[in-house]
Amino acid sequence: MNIGKIPLAQGVDRVVDWLTDALGPFFNFISTFVQSIIDTSVDVLGFGPPIVLILLLTLLAFYTNKWPLALFTFIGLLLIDNLGYWDAMIQTLALVLASVLITVILGIPLGILASQSKWLRNILMPILDFMQTMPGFVYLIPAILFFGIGVVPGIVASVIFAIAPAIRMTSLGIQEVPKDLIEASDAFGSTRGQKIMKVQLPLAMPTIMAGINQSIMLSLSMVVMASLVGAPGLGAEVYRAVSQIKVGEGFEAGLAIVIIAIILDRISQKLRTPAFESIVKGKWIYSLVIVLFLGGYTVTSLLNAELKGSENASIGAQVDYKIVGIDPGSGVMSRTQEAMDQYGLSDDWTLQEGSSAAMGAELKKAYDRKEPIVITGWTPHWMFGKFDLKYLDDPKGVYGESEDIHTLVRKGLKEDLPGAEKVLNQFYWETSDMESVMKDIEEGMGSKEAAIKWIEANKSKVDQWVNDAEKGNGENITLVYVAWESEVASTNVIAEVLRMQGYEPVLRQVEIGPMYAAIASGKADAMVAAWLPTTSKAYYDKYKEDFVDLGPNLKGTRLGLVVPAYVEIDSIEDLRVE
Ligand code: PBE
């Protein structure tokens, strides 16, 4: 029986497209709202020197859990500051606090409702199971379309991921309240509302707090994932370390996350029964914390208002002084850091990390609304065919001249698979070729299908690549690549050509550092993604003794800062804040 593949993915895409259009203003509202919670939290937590927050948190830890946790908090936070992760830690803390706040606001009422009705529970529980089991990653994709990149989609994804225990435990806690107590309160003639607020909720508190504790831990576990869509913080530090294979820094950032996790976990477990409850009542302490927070908020927002007043609507102000970037390890990102230094932008501008797919989505969104945006761009890329864009002039030449893309293979490939090595060596095409494959993929064709389509339309070119090359016999050949659109295109094309030659290509998508390391260590056979001499220089130089460079497969690439043509500036110098 052949009923064909059910178009599930297409269906989901349609729904998401429709939602993006229909609920655009609503998503914008949510986005602004969540962003303001985050900005406020970051401002307040980062107010004053680190030692102020360190002491306050130490006191709180002392109050709830006595001196061992207080000592741990004090030393742990000092260590984070000393290692240079203070600002990142603040960002992470703000992300977790915001997502827990939203989780509680939505989760507890839902939990109460669920506890009151069996059929609601029957509907809700499987949905919660589903939400919690679906890999958190998946939520990031629609979240980018709805909320753009940055911290907001990260928070939304972590709320979806972390809300289940809050709802479940609230409902469970209320259901577990002993029957006789309910009967007693019925006998006293209490209304349903009184019963919930005065009897059930207080008795369910331990269970509810356990649920909130779980939610905190789950949202903390989302911080690394959130960094893939541009959320700053400790997660972004970990992600950066992975993509550049920096073991030590990865460990430091990971350790900072562990320290924060322990502190938040222990404090939140004891919030209801703090160690010194008998000396000072919890409600006084927590009110004090809230008053401090609100006080901090008032002061920082007054300060901010003063700053804002002196700004005009420069391009910088319009884009919030953000350059939308891609994965942290890539060459265009390190060039952009350098450009920001050389053009004096580093103090005012931030370079947002993420992925090239997320950047593409952000560009598309801004372009559709004719809003300004500044991105890290490169050619060949489908975006130049689809949108009217321009490179900003780079009078200091930070982004370098036009470059070539080289094919690199592991040592010994020529001896082991001479036919495959020959094809890789003879692989050479033009910018327009690569762009036509990229365009098909962008428009929804599978990358393999797009590659085959190009190969069929360009037989004579492919014939030159396979000329004189020995055929394979089903041998595996492992190709590594990074998910940049240009590399997705080239890697799939060469893979399909190798398949036609009788080899069995295995494609592995990795981060940039691991891509070079894999070839240098012989764990992978080839890559077609080395942008040289400047873009990938750091990785090339690090491993150059350990691979074979087969020379260019494409000439004439370019990198730089890119804006839509309707943005009225022409040079990187115009970004400077006077
Ligand atoms: N890119 C695409 C990569 C190389 C290929 C320009 C994003 C980089 O910046 O490293």
Image (cartoon, grey):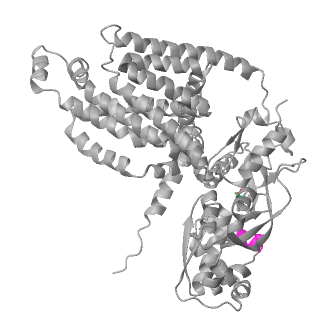
Q: Is residue 431 magenta?
A: yes
Residues drawn in magenta: 430-435
Q: Residue at x 66, y 78 (%)?
A: 454
* Nearest the eye: 550 or 131: 550
Residue furthest top as drawn: 279
Asked if residue 141 is among those painted magenta in the image, a careful observer would answer no
Q: Quadrant of residue 36?
A: top right
Q: Give 85 or 142, whichever is nearer the viewer.
A: 85
Task: Please name whichever residue, 460 or 472, is drawn nearer the observer in this view of the structure.
Answer: 472
Identify the residue at image location x=58%, y=41%. 231
Image spot of residue 141 (x, y percent): 52, 51
Magenta stretch: dominant secondary structure? helix
Placement of 3 over or under 191, stated as above or below: below
Q: Quadrant of residue 47?
A: top right
Q: Quadrant of the N terminus?
A: bottom left
Horizontal and vertical percent for residue 538? 73, 56
